[in-house]
Image (cartoon, coloured by chain):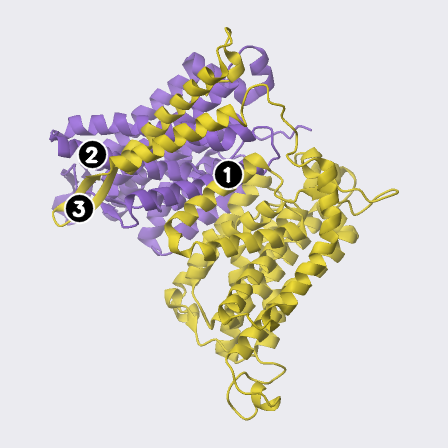
Chain colours: A purple, B yellow
Amino acid sequence: MEYFLQQLINGVTLGSIYGLIAIGYTMVYGIIGMINFAHGDVFMVGSFMALIVFLALLALGVTFVPLALLIVLILAMALTSLYGWTVERIAYRPLRGSFRLAPLISAIGMSIFLQNMVQVAQGARVKPLPPVITGGYQFGAAEGFVVNVSNVQIIIVVTTIALMVAFSLIVSRTPLGRAQRACEQDRKMAALLGVDVDRTISLTFVMGAALASVAGLMYLLYYGVIDFYIGFVAGVKAFTAAVLGGIGSLPGAMLGGLLIGLIETFWSAYFTVEYKDVAAFSILAIVLIFLPSGLLGRPEVEKV
Amino acid sequence: MSDPHAGAAAPSVFGVAFKDAAFAALVALGLAAPMLGLVTVQTQSGIELEQHWGKVAIAVAIVFAGRLLLNLTLWRPGRKKSLSYVPPKVEAKLARFAKYLAPLAILGAVVMPMLPFTERYAIDLGILVLTYVMLGWGLNIVVGLAGLLDLGYVAFYAVGAYSYALLAQYFGLSFWVCLPLAGILAAFWGVILGFPVLRLRGDYLAIVTLAFGEIIRIVLLNWYWFTGGPNGISGIPRPSFFGLDFDRGDDGFAATFGLDYSPLHRIVFLYYLILALALLTNFVTIRLRRLPIGRAWEALREDEIACRSLGINTVNTKLTAFALGAMFAGFAGSFFATRQGFISPESFVFMESALILAIVVLGGMGSQFGVAVAAVVMIGGFELFREFSDYRMITFGLVMVLIMIWRPRGLVSTRSPSVFLKEKKAISGSLVQEGHG
């Protein structure tokens, strides 16, 4: 039971990270109907930005951890957003209205570019970060089994919930969110009614990249090591999460992320660690085949 | 970045171009400063930052100059934009010329190993290029003809390679028995993996095939007792020439034909083997395009809904494309295994799929000749820039993006119809509007 609880906590933490990345996929898919294949690599860039900013702050002598984390969070979000914006501007915007596989192929190219750019610029070796946030809480020490909840896990889950609420409010309450939802329904009509479609799409990419960078920061804090290749597997899993929750739906992405995180953790805990990626990838296939609209998504109506 | 036409007071062209370039340079500064300027290095005491501001300056300068130059030349406001960079007429003429180019290229490939100045290195490179030509042609059936984006094509390549390696290891079967078996097994896997994903839309299909490709790789990696896991399989038997081995023995190839033994014999034999396999792939594809199934593929690529309403069985059509594409990958895989003598899951990563896909896309989806040219250019280019191995992948990714922007239909994008009324007219691919399905 304690083992189960421990895995549950680990799974929720992992799921929060996946959920944050999945939001980027789901928002972009919702608004322009393409899979942003490079999003996983934007997440990877985000985690590198977090590491670099953190080390720069250390070098500058900022050692008060909460302040440092806050600055890292803001700067990493800003810098990664710039990457997200540029990727959209260079690789996707010129292809709007091109044939249907073009943006996806361009996105694969962008993903390869980002991965190798980071490899060349920052080196291929894994980058360890010594634990920044230590400590945590223990439960059930008396019964022999111990359930650990580390402070990092608490921070990850709380930040995720806060960001989820904030972004849900942006999408449902602000003019930007209204423009996004309008573009999602009918881009041409939205343009006719005075919505700046290009700007809205750009901002969607910026939001997705910002959330991915937060996920990158959390990944860095949680695992303590990153390399240039983390974006690929995390990206596919987050995409699975977005599909599982129903692509285009924000709460769905979060729910899907949690489920994928839990499934992966429990699979590793009770079956085999080696095949945890197989579990996640199989779920993607199964969901797409039997439940193409996901858990919370609306069924897609094909228009001719 | 905003539209240069937007300026109400119509400032000078140079002013607008300069402003835009300055903005781009600013963005480049933001992108490059942390990534290129502050490099994380591992030291004895932990991890530290190293400063490289020179690189940042170079990157920003390149972006600024490049953007300014483009703004003043290619992107100059008011410059007439043609739909296609090559006029359709010229393109059609090129296509007619290509009719003679293809036999010439085949002839060149056939005589290449016989030329006196050909070295072993050139033949080895030729084998490598031809393997990718064959893979490109195989994937072309799936992506180019049927329009199904398959990101896990390398899985079938792996199935073919492992089929031969395992059959040879456990049952001692020879290459010539295993070659068709590997093709059949790969085709079988193509059907198995293809069947569940047929209802999916183009980009969903891509991700699921990617997932399948990764699953197969992970299984090969972790199934230690059967596949050898990350150690792979070594000592895979070499092919024989109608039962004659390429060795020094008295019943070897060299002794039978009264030649002096040379290791080059096997290399040349392998070269002709892969050439024959590749040409077989090409031949089958060209013939299939004329059959109803091939026409159904192309119709499916253009508009799936129209296909369905015209009574084409889309399930069978897609499955045959998947199975045939997979079969040729299986052939290529078993060839790969017998050539290398050693295989491991490391040869079948996603990058390989992306590379083969890039060959098909760059060559012009559906164009056999274009795919061959793209394979030669890409693999040859990779070999040429071997010393700059760090940068070639960056360039590779960037080229994929640029080709999609510049010519989304690939380099050779003419569509020559397989059915025509009076005369055969090739049309530029950029003039073809594609339906959604």
Q: Label 2, label 3: how many angstroms apart (C-alpha)? A: 32 Å
| Residue A252 placement, left or right of A47 | right
| Residue B121 placement, left or right of B45 | right
- Count every numbered label the image shows and give the total: 3
Q: Nearer the viewer, residue B154 or A256?
A: B154
Label 2 CA crowd tier, 10 Å (few <14, some 14–19, many 20+) = many
The image shows residue A278, relative to residue A16, as above or below, that is below
Residue type indicated by callout 3? Val
Kindly identify which residue carries mark 1.
B401
Kindly identify which residue carries mark 2.
A54
Image-quadrant location for residue B157: bottom right
Subunit of label 3: A
Kindly identify which residue carries mark 3.
A146
Q: Which is more foreground, mark 2 or mark 3?
A: 2
Image-quadrant location for residue A84: top left
Quadrant where the image shows the N terminus of chain B:
top left
Image-quadrant location for residue A204: top left
Residue type indicated by callout 1? Val
Residue at 50% over, 78% down: B237
Q: Mark 2–mark 1 contact, CB under 8 Å? A: no
Task: Kindly state the secondary structure of the residue where label 1 is placed.
Answer: helix
Q: Position of residue B252 (x, y in %)?
A: 56, 88
For this orientation, the residue located farthest to the right is: B422
Task: Kindly state the secondary structure of the residue where label 2 is placed.
Answer: helix
Q: Label 1, label 3: how many angstroms apart (C-alpha)? A: 51 Å
Determine which of the numbered discs, if any, sits on residue B62 in the image.
none
Residue type indicated by callout 2? Phe
Q: Position of residue A71 (x, y in %)?
A: 21, 26
Subunit of label 1: B
Q: Position of residue A247 (x, y in %)?
A: 49, 32
Q: Is residue B331 something one can see in this rendering?
A: yes
Q: Mark 1–mark 3 contact, CB under 8 Å? A: no
